[in-house]
Image: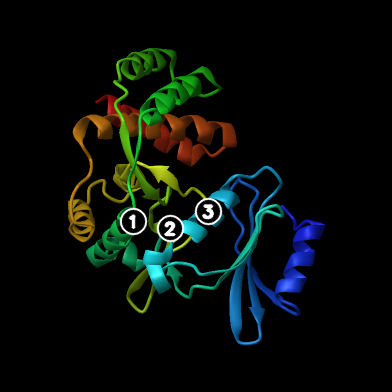
Amino acid sequence: MRLGRRQRELLRRWLPGAEVVRDHSWGPDGTTVLELRLGDDRYIAKAAAEGDHHLLRELRAHQNWLGPLGARGPELVHADADARLLVTRFLPGELVQGHDAERRPDTYRQAGRLLASLHGQLTVEDADFEAQLKRKTLSRLDGEHRIAPEIVDRLRAEVGSWPTPPAALVPTHGDWQPRNWLVHEGVLRVIDFGRADLRPAFTDFTRLAAQQFRGAPELEAAFLDGYGHDPREPGAWRRERFREAIATAVWAYQMGLSDFERQGHRMIEEALA
């Protein structure tokens, strides 16, 4: 999306004279991400359309949960929730995805430590969390997708059998993986909290388990070493793997992301196996 009038006005007021260095916008969600320079300082401005909930999640994370990350997470400078606009200080570093660091165990050890500091701030018990996700998963299967009918039948039987125990929720990132990590002089940093919310801790393991940990047990071992323990209780982790697989296949189809859709179908096959 382009910046709206109110968003442009706020940026001019907050950072008068700032110039755009680079447009980092990507993906199908319509969020505009701009790198700005003002004198010797650099910033990241994120702007979303009215009704977007990701930017509000990110703002909530900044206001409540990012303290333990210190300089290894983004620092909020300005924000206006109504305008769907926030500005953070620029974090130097190279994206870990596609970098040599993506294959180094120490990257995952650092990522585990950072995640443990985020998760360790508070725990809230939610009696309805599992039941809500069970309903949402069945609803996804009712929507448009390219999951074969016989597979849908197996998935419905699986999801329908799930218990709905109370869940312990912690502050989670929601997309904890190398595309949201930066490495600078060997130090890992994390960005993009647009999916942050209170969820079970193990939900921040799902993207890595489906991607970087496949065929690389040394990376998973390093991550768990950094995190300190493995929160993936077998029953809850099984349900999460199915939820993530179904969500990936359905959402990617609806967004027209064929590579990601194929990953979702692979995840479904592996969960059923």
Q: Which residue is mark 3?
A: 60
Q: Are marks 3 and 1 in contact (CB under 8 Å)?
A: no
Label 3 and label 2: CA atoms lie apart by 8 Å
- Residue 75, above or below 192: below
Horizontal arrangement in the rendering, residue 43 relative to residue 183 (left or right): right
Q: Which residue is mark 2?
A: 65
Horizontal arrangement in the rendering, residue 105 relative to residue 34 (left or right): left
Q: Earlier in the sequence, mark 3 or mark 2?
A: 3
Q: Which residue is mark 1?
A: 121
Label 2 element class? loop
Label 3 element class? helix
Please name the residue shown 41% across and 16% down the image.
152
Please name the residue shown 30% across and 15% down the image.
161
Q: Are marks 2 and 1 in contact (CB under 8 Å)?
A: yes
x, y percent for residue 224: 20, 54
Give the amino acid type for the residue marked by disc 1 in the picture: Gln
Q: Is residue 106 visible?
A: yes
x, y percent for residue 205: 31, 46
